[in-house]
């Protein structure tokens, strides 16, 4: 009887380890995806922004794809 419970306990620990490992792998993959997606958005924003100085001042023109408009800051 003692060996039966011991075997069950070992099986439960194996399942717990597999479940925790799968959770960690999925969380890591999701984090990498979200960070990469954020960097792509930043890269896109930088590509659509430029600075110029027509009268010794600086302006930043930003193009928004959502509104299809240029904004000057």
Image (spheres, rainbow, N blue to C red):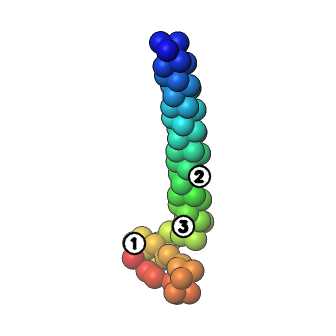
| Residue shown at 56% from the left, 87% from the top | 68
Q: Which residue is mark 2?
A: 33
Extreme residue in the front direction: 1
| Residue shown at 43% from the left, 80% from the top | 72
Residue 13 position in % (x across, y down): 51, 25
Q: Is residue 56 above or below residue 8?
A: below
Q: Name the foreground residue: 57 vs 3.
A: 3
| Residue shown at 55% from the left, 63% from the top | 41
Sequence-first tag of 2 and 3: 2
Query: Which mark identifies residue 45?
Result: 3
Extreme residue in the top direction: 2
Q: Is any part of residue 54 visible from this angle?
A: yes
Q: Name the foreground residue: 17 vs 57.
A: 17
Residue 30 position in % (x across, y down): 55, 50
Image quadrant of residue 34? bottom right
Tell me the quadrant of the picture where the C terminus can be found. bottom left
Q: CA distance from mark 2 to mark 1?
A: 39 Å
Q: Which residue is mark 1?
A: 57
Q: Is any part of residue 43 visible from this angle?
A: no
């Amino acid at each position: 009887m003692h060996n039966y419970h011991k075997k069950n306990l070992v099986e439960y620990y194996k399942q717990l380890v597999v479940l925790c490992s799968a959770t960690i792998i999925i969380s890591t993959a999701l984090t990498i995806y979200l960070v990469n997606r954020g960097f792509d958005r930043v890269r896109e924003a930088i590509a659509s922004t430029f600075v110029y100085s027509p009268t010794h001042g600086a302006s930043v023109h930003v193009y928004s794809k959502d509104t299809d408009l240029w904004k000057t800051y």
